[in-house]
């Protein structure tokens, strides 16, 4: 971003240059990332960029944008650079202590919402295991305004981010954040109507093949689930019956190819019924659902 043909860097020219630069770096969404970073540098929204293509950038603005572009060029996720990611229509704070919320997890939210609509409770009790940024807990609290939620994570740093997001969306009074392993912190709580979990499920051998944004920047503790990715899920499923109310729902996000093994785990022991999956936009089973036998 040294000079333009006439020495004037307009918003349009900066975006064109950055898009080409990001594409050469192998970044998947070069234009979108360029726009998000420029909007942040200017403290404007993306619509402003479209209506001010010919506006020149001053040196201070260029310097600020250049710093963001350099970080993205090293494959740092945009969400970490901006400390924010939109999820289910809500802006969420994110840091390197938590995973970047992904669109695939929205299928889990949809499944829980549909189940709550079909099985209405006056004050449903929900539990989010491995809450991370609090994406699931906060969105469900927003979408189900009579619900109470317990959000669990082994990382106090992650819980701090989740608390921030609860405060951003005015649901703090209805979410209890607890530190601990899986369902251990709620061993004496009343049973839940819904237990949802987006646990580590990436197989460890896949680590070298992941995108640099994921492999080099996101917390490994929240990503990897052992050789086949199911180590943590295998520990959770046997603990579910004691913490799930009869007829209650369990919703687990899973990885590609894991559905047969997860289905077998849920179907063993005659504890769960209506075991089924929800596919993502690519057609892969992404959410495993089951209901506790009455």
Image (cartoon, helix red, strand yellow):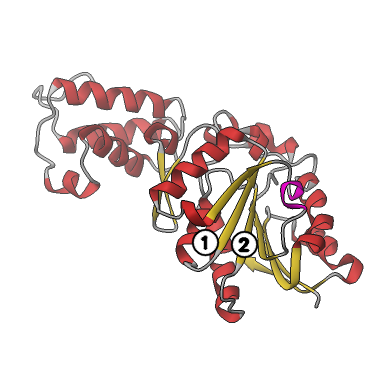
* Residue range of the region highlighted in magenta in the rendering: 183-187
Between residues 57 and 21, which one lies in front from this camera angle? 57
**In what quadrant of the picture does the C terminus appear?**
bottom right
The residue at which mark 2 appears reads as 126
Q: Is residue 185 magenta?
A: yes
Q: Residue at x 80, y 40 (%)?
A: 227
Most extreme residue toward the right is: 269
Numbered circle sitting on residue 61: none
Q: Residue at x 28, y 23 (%)?
A: 66
Give the side of residue 231 with respect to residue 10, left or right.
right
Say whether marks 2 and 1 touch (CB < 8 Å): yes
Between residues 288 and 6, which one lies in front from this camera angle? 288
Between residues 102 and 125, which one lies in front from this camera angle? 125
Give the side of residue 68 with respect to residue 215, left or right.
left
Camera sees residue 211? no
Label 1 Cα crowd, 10 Å radius (few <14 / some 14-19 / many 20+) = many
Label 2 Cα crowd, 10 Å radius (few <14 / some 14-19 / many 20+) = many
Q: Residue at x 39, y 58 (%)?
A: 89
**In what quadrant of the picture does the N terminus appear?**
top left
Measured from the top left, where is residue 98 in percent x and y? 55, 38
Among the 4 quarters of the image, the one containing residue 272: bottom right
Measured from the top left, where is residue 159 in percent x and y? 56, 40
The residue at which mark 1 appears reads as 140
Measured from the top left, where is residue 45 in percent x and y? 23, 45
Q: Is residue 237 magenta?
A: no
Q: Dominant secondary structure of the magenta stretch?
A: helix
Query: Sequence-wise, which precedes: disc 2 or disc 1?
Result: 2
Measured from the top left, where is residue 108 in percent x and y? 59, 62
Give the side of residue 76 with respect to residue 47, left or right.
right
């Amino acid at each position: 971003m040294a000079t333009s043909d006439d020495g004037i860097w307009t918003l349009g020219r900066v975006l064109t240059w950055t898009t080409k630069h990001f594409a050469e770096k192998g970044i998947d969404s070069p234009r979108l990332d360029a726009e998000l970073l420029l909007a942040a540098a200017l403290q404007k929204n993306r619509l402003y960029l479209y209506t001010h293509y010919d506006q020149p950038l001053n040196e201070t603005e260029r310097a600020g944008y250049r710093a963001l572009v350099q970080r993205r060029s090293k494959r740092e996720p945009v969400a970490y650079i901006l400390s924010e990611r939109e999820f289910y229509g809500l802006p969420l704070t994110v840091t390197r202590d938590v995973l970047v919320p992904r669109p695939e997890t929205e299928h889990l939210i949809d499944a829980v919402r549909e189940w709550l609509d079909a099985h209405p409770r006056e004050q449903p009790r929900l539990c989010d295991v491995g809450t991370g940024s609090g994406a699931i807990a906060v969105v469900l609290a927003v979408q189900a305004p009579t619900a109470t939620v317990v959000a669990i994570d082994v990382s106090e740093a992650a819980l701090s981010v989740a608390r921030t997001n609860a405060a951003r969306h005015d649901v703090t009074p209805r979410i209890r954040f607890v530190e601990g392993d899986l369902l251990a912190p709620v061993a004496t709580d009343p049973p839940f109507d819904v237990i949802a979990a987006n646990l580590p499920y990436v197989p460890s051998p896949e680590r070298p093949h992941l995108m640099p944004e994921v492999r080099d920047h996101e917390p490994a503790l929240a990503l990897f689930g052992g050789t086949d990715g199911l180590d943590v899920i295998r520990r959770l499923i046997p603990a579910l019956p004691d913490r799930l109310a009869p007829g209650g729902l369990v919703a687990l996000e899973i990885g590609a190819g894991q559905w047969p093994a997860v289905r077998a785990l849920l179907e063993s022991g005659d504890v769960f019924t209506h075991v089924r999956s929800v596919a993502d936009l690519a057609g892969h089973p992404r959410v495993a659902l089951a209901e506790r036998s009455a």
